[in-house]
Image (cartoon, rainbow, N blue to C red):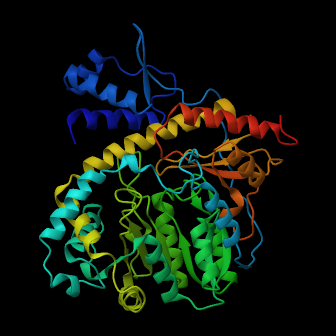
């Protein structure tokens, strides 16, 4: 990281933690240069970077000031508690009807589950693919078939180690994206009819997996800042024969919530006490906006109960479908099940990503990606405040690329979805994120695409549609 990038990150952290409040003047270039012992050129470059990220703005003859991302502060959504219940999952038809409606490339993709491919270094990856395939040892295509490319597993293990979590390379199994990893983990530890604790709201793909495997969902509420409600989870573990948990610990989809580190430690301890495995879906962990990468629950697992799943689809190569699982005590079973189902992830794709991780500047790419996503988040938050009704609540994630918006209770988000789609705007309505079709007045919005005039106009149109619905103003 260059000196001006490090200095920019230090100022950004002061803004995130509230030391520098919205509207407050940041230190002048001369003062910052003298106080922090850096050149004026470094300060200027840092301030230009912070300006591009939407964190500060210049005022003529006055200096730089912290941006006011919203004209009026909007409250966050609140976690709602429910009585303990088990639910047979039946959401696929609803999910498919929503997803099939947003494939038009001319539609504003607020309902998409992916960030823009423009944010990824695809030409550089293509060069890595060509290089890796040209130099590939033919014997490795068989030797590495089920556990995965050895060079790739080594690079992943190194990233775990740098993050303070040393893992044996034998624990890693490469999969066809994180979704296959998550499926394999769930199949290893459950049988049809078993109970699985999931988040509420939850990523709709997890609901579809439970539906396919004929498992029953136990919904655990999620707070937009604190993550899953550990007290409710403990109660459910005491009262119900839960066989597994499936949670996102960092920048949860759709809420954007992350468990603070101490709560991750508590979660690992709680699950160890009950000997219940955790399938940790951590595909957004690299997309943090602060200075330090968040630790996974896996970092606090002393008994091998956590199966940590991730992929490169959200951070580097969406079309390559390369994910992995660090399976803990279940690694051998996961590898055997992988062998019996899909045998191997794409060998050339694995080799390409291994080459890129070693030579392509992955961390440099990630810094640019985080800066872009943070700027786009700020733009969408400001647009929500400008255009949506005053009763609106919205999450403020510190990573990932989703906002969770809670509209006035009278708003039917499925109806909003239909009306918005007719105007060329997609959203992800709340009911597709619940086994019990809850969150009917909520929606997930994707800020993972470069902000444009079309984005701003789409938010304005959404606001008009919401106000046109019965019972809103």
Which residue occupies the extreme right position in the image?
471
Q: Is residue 429 above or below residue 175?
A: above
Relative placement, left or right, of 411 versus 318 is: right
Query: x%, y% of residue 216?
Result: 67, 82
Quadrant of the drawing holding the C terminus = top right
Question: Can you see residue 207?
Answer: yes
Q: Residue at x 64, y 57 (%)?
A: 101
Question: Can you see residue 384?
Answer: no
Query: x%, y% of residue 10?
Result: 33, 36
Which residue occupies the extreme top position in the image?
61
Q: Quadrant of residue 211?
A: bottom right
Quadrant of the drawing holding the N terminus = top left
Q: Nearer the viewer, residue 357 or 23?
A: 357
Query: x%, y% of residue 303?
Result: 40, 82
Query: x%, y% of residue 291?
Result: 35, 45
Q: Is residue 408 above or below residue 248?
A: above
Q: Is residue 364 above or below residue 457?
A: below
Q: Quadrant of residue 351?
A: bottom left
Q: Nearer the viewer, residue 292 or 202?
A: 202
Total label count?
Answer: 0
Q: Is residue 358 above or below residue 384?
A: below
Relative placement, left or right, of 432 versus 274 is: right
Q: Residue at x 29, y 48 (%)?
A: 365
Q: Residue at x 25, y 72 (%)?
A: 348
Q: Nearer the viewer, residue 83 or 362?
A: 362
């Amino acid at each position: 990281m260059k000196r001006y990038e490090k200095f920019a990150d230090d100022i950004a952290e002061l803004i995130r933690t509230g030391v520098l409040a919205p509207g407050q003047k940041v230190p002048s270039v001369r003062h910052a240069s003298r106080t922090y012992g850096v050149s004026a050129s470094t300060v200027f470059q840092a301030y230009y970077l912070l300006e591009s990220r939407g964190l500060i703005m210049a005022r003529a003859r006055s200096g730089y000031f912290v941006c006011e991302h919203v004209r009026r502060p909007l409250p966050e959504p609140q976690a709602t508690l429910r009585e303990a219940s088990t639910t047979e999952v039946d959401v696929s038809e609803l999910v498919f009807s929503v997803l099939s409606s947003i494939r038009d490339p001319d539609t504003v993709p607020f309902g998409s589950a992916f960030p823009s491919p423009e944010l990824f270094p695809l030409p550089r990856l293509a060069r890595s693919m060509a290089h890796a395939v040209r130099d590939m040892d033919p014997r490795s295509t068989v030797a590495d078939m089920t556990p995965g490319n050895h060079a790739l597993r080594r690079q992943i293990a190194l990233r775990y180690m740098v993050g303070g979590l040393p893992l044996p390379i034998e624990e890693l199994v490469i999969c066809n994206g994180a979704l296959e990893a998550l499926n394999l983990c769930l199949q290893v530890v459950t049988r049809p009819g078993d109970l699985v604790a999931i988040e509420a709201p939850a990523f709709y793909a997890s609901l579809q997996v439970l539906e396919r495997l004929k498992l029953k969902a136990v919904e655990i509420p999620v707070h937009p800042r604190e993550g899953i409600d550990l007290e409710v989870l403990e109660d459910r573990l005491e009262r119900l024969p839960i066989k597994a948990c499936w949670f996102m610990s960092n920048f949860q989809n759709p809420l954007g919530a992350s468990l603070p580190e101490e709560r991750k430690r508590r979660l690992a301890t709680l699950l160890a006490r009950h000997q219940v495995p955790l399938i940790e879906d951590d595909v957004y962990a690299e997309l943090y906006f602060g200075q330090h990468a968040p630790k996974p629950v896996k970092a606090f697992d002393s008994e091998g109960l956590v199966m940590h799943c991730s992929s490169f689809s959200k951070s580097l190569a969406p079309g390559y479908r390369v994910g992995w699982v660090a399976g803990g005590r279940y690694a051998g079973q996961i590898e055997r099940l992988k062998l019996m189902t899909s045998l191997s992830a794409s060998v050339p794709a694995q080799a390409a990503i291994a080459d890129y991780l070693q030579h392509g500047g992955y961390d440099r790419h990630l810094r640019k990606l985080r800066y872009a996503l943070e700027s786009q988040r700020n733009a969408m938050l400001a647009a929500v405040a400008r255009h949506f009704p005053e009763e609106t609540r919205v999450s403020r994630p510190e990573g990932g690329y989703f906002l969770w918006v809670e509209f006035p209770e009278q708003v039917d988000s499925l109806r909003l979805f239909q009306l918005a789609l007719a105007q060329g705007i997609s959203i992800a309505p709340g009911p597709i994120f619940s086994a019990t079709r809850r969150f009917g007045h909520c929606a997930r919005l994707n800020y993972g695409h470069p902000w444009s005039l079309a984005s701003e106009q789409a938010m304005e149109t959404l606001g008009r549609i919401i106000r046109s619905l019965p019972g809103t103003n």
